[in-house]
Amino acid sequence: MACKVQLKPVACVWAITFFFLIFWLIPGCDSPYKAVRLNPVKLFETKNQNAVNSSNPSMETRQFLRLMFLDKSYSGDPRQTIGVLEQKVRN
């Protein structure tokens, strides 16, 4: 009888460990990326958009402005923001 009493806590620990591992691993099996179908024409137009052929800057320029925390100031006053960037380049 004493032997059965000692096995129950060990079995319980194994069961809890097993279920913990299963519930810990299952969410990791889901992919964080999803495929979204894009319109090729719209993608081409967006990718080739720049200040010359539209009223918006290119994707690379917008990304640079976001990285430099200048996107909001550019949307408010683009000329002043370009002047600030020009001064940074000259100094």
Image (tube, helix red, strand yellow):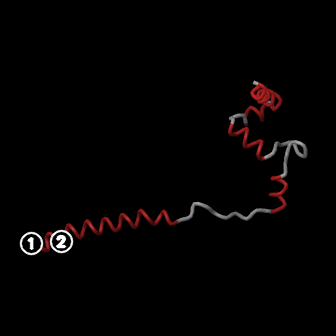
Residue 85 placed where, x, y %?
77, 30
Residue 3 horizontal/vertical position (percent): 11, 73
Left or right: 90 as drawn, with respect to 22:
right
Q: Amino acid at mark 2?
A: Leu
Q: Nearer the viewer, residue 73 or 63?
A: 63
Residue found at x 23% / y 70%: 11
Q: Which residue is mark 1?
A: 2
Q: Position of residue 4 (x, y in %)?
A: 14, 74
Instruction: Say which quarter of the image contains residue 80.
Output: top right
Please identify the quadrant where the C terminus is shown. top right
Give the vertical position of 52 relative to 85 (above or below).
below
Looking at the figure, which quarter contains the N terminus? bottom left
Q: Earlier in the sequence, mark 1 or mark 2?
A: 1
Quarter-wise, where is residue 65 in the image? top right
Q: Nearer the viewer, residue 67 or 40?
A: 67
Answer above or below: position of 23 versus 87.
below
Q: Secondary structure at mark 2?
A: helix
Query: Residue 86's quadrant in the figure?
Result: top right
Classify residue 25 as left or right of residue 41.
Answer: left
Left or right for 6, reference 77: left
> Percent x, y for residue 64?
73, 40
Residue pointed to by mark 2: 7
Residue lying farthest front? Answer: 91
Q: Residues within 10 Å of mark 1 (few under 14, many from 20)?
A: few
| Along the line of sight, the residue nearer the viewer: 54 or 52 | 52
Kind of residue sitting beneath label 1: Ala
Q: In the structure shown, which secondary structural element does the residue marked by tag 1 occupy? A: helix
Residue pushed farthest right?
53
Q: Mark 1 and mark 2: span between their CA atoms?
A: 9 Å
* Residue in the picture at 72% in, 43% down: 63
